[in-house]
């Protein structure tokens, strides 16, 4: 026990000798690591770095890979700028009615429409303009007629008030005279995605105290009602799993309308989405609904399809509580600060950071593998690296000042008393 006490006393003495300035800097940089990570979350460059680290960790995890369950049906340039749709916005509803009916004939497990059905006149008694009313009726009739053949999920419009609370907006299918929507066979879910696409959107509560499921959760609940019997309203969203967009089965709306891919749709979750260029056929930004995902740039429909399969396969990774993450960051920062308190070179300090990084990556992988829990390690390591550099520069400055003071003393003339 005596050697242990001697080592502890020596360590305490070293820490005390570093002075208050050193520990204040360590605390400041630890706080910057935690606070900076929140500020940088909206930075696309920093988010891309975190995305790459996440996918690397995900791909090193064993276990079941993707089981194909989703087929994407794209309304592409050829259709959107063709004679029928004529590049019109909003999308022609009678065209959607025909597309829904043709997909339903293939007997899919579910049809999900990643199409914006938000009412253009939300403050009016009517949910749409008179010019579109006949189209709306055709689409409503198709939805209600085909719900006996397959389940259907539509997008639900939600927006945020000036006070920050969410509200439900009016949709063009509201007040459908053929059948009430939502109902037992037709579900609705909001399309909005979190800034960090690693997170799985679940349910949100509106200012009317109504809980609305995300588009992906609405699909998962329809397909697996026993797995997701109720809405999930969590404060901290879980992390999902990502697969490359090329792994998903695809078809075009033209192929569907020409009965060229019935077998591809049978028994599948069929997601219809827009995939046309914004300005003109083949020109402009790719599509409005495009995101930077952990596996590259992809359309929103792919993100929703990926989230659906994550939910169905239960490949969710829990996020530790904010308090637990703060405590872990503080302990790691304290450990590195104590290690840096010894008079060691900058290279040795970076060796300690690299060793800590390796240990944390291994711990993160084990937590992901065994407990399905993911925690972020990049911000703290970046902050402590900055602390190591600043502390070393400060030490160099003090050494330089001491040498300068010594030189002044030597050159000072001898004083007679």
Image (cartoon, rainbow, N blue to C red):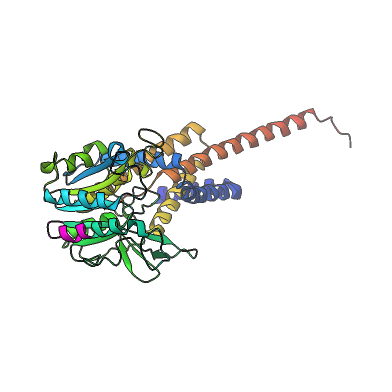
Name the dominant secondary structure of the magenta segment. Answer: helix
Can see residue 269?
A: yes
Identify which residue, 247 or 150, lies in the foreground: 150
Give coordinates of residue 176: x percent, y percent: 26, 65
Residues rendered magenta in the picture = 141-150
Residue 149 in magenta stretch: yes
Q: Quadrant of the C terminus?
A: top right
39 relative to 188, above or below: above
Give coordinates of residue 119: x percent, y percent: 37, 59
Give coordinates of residue 252: x percent, y percent: 22, 39
410 relative to 204, above or below: above
Residue 361 in magenta stretch: no
Identify which residue, 201 or 76, lies in the foreground: 76
Q: Residue furthest bottom?
A: 209
Along the horizontal axis of the image, is 305 left or right of 53?
left
Q: Residue at x 46, y 35 (%)?
A: 350
Identify which residue, 22 or 110, lies in the foreground: 110
Can see residue 317?
A: no
Identify which residue, 413 or 219, lies in the foreground: 219
Q: Residue furthest right?
A: 417
Along the horizontal axis of the image, is 110 left or right of 303?
left
Q: Quadrant of residue 125?
A: bottom left
54 relative to 236, above or below: above
Q: Residue at x 59, y 36 (%)?
A: 393
Give coordinates of residue 167: x percent, y percent: 40, 65
């Amino acid at each position: 026990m005596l050697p242990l006490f001697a080592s502890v006393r020596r360590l305490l003495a070293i820490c005390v000798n570093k002075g208050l300035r050193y520990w204040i800097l360590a605390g400041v940089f630890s706080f910057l690591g935690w606070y900076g990570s929140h500020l940088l979350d909206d930075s696309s460059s920093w988010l891309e770095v975190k995305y790459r680290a996440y996918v690397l960790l995900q791909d090193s995890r064993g276990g079941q890979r993707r089981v194909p369950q989703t087929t994407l049906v794209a309304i592409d340039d050829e259709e959107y700028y063709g004679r029928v749709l004529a590049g019109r916005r909003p999308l022609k509803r009678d065209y959607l009615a025909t597309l829904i009916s043709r997909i339903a004939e293939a007997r899919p497990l579910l049809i999900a429409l990643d199409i914006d059905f938000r009412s253009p006149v939300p403050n009016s008694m009517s949910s749409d303009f008179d010019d579109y009313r006949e189209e709306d009726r055709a689409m409503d009739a198709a939805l209600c007629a085909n719900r006996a053949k397959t389940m259907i999920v539509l997008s639900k419009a939600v927006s945020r008030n000036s006070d920050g609370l969410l509200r439900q907006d009016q949709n063009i299918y509201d007040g459908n005279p053929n059948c009430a929507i939502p109902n037992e066979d037709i579900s609705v879910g909001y399309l909005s995605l979190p800034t960090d696409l690693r997170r799985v959107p679940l349910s949100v509560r509106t200012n009317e105290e109504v809980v609305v499921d995300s588009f992906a959760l609405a699909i998962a609940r329809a397909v697996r009602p026993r797995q997701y019997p109720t809405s999930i309203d969590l404060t901290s969203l879980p992390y999902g799993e990502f697969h490359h967009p090329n792994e998903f089965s695809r078809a075009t709306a033209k192929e569907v309308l020409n009965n060229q891919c019935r077998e591809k749709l049978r028994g599948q979750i069929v997601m219809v989405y827009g995939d046309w260029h914004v300005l003109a056929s083949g020109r402009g930004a790719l599509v409005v609904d495009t995101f930077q995902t952990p596996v590259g740039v992809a359309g929103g429909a792919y993100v929703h399809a990926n989230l659906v399969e994550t939910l169905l396969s239960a490949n969710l990774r829990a996020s530790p509580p904010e308090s637990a993450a703060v405590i872990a960051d503080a302990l790691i920062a304290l450990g590195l600060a104590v290690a840096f308190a010894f008079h060691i070179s900058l290279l040795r300090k970076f060796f300690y950071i690299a060793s800590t990084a390796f240990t944390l990556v291994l711990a993160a992988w084990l937590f992901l593998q065994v407990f399905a829990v993911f925690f972020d390690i990049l911000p703290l390591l970046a902050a402590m690296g900055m602390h190591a550099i600043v502390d070393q520069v400060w030490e160099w400055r003090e050494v330089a000042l001491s040498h300068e003071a010594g030189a002044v003393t030597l050159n000072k003339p001898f004083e007679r008393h």
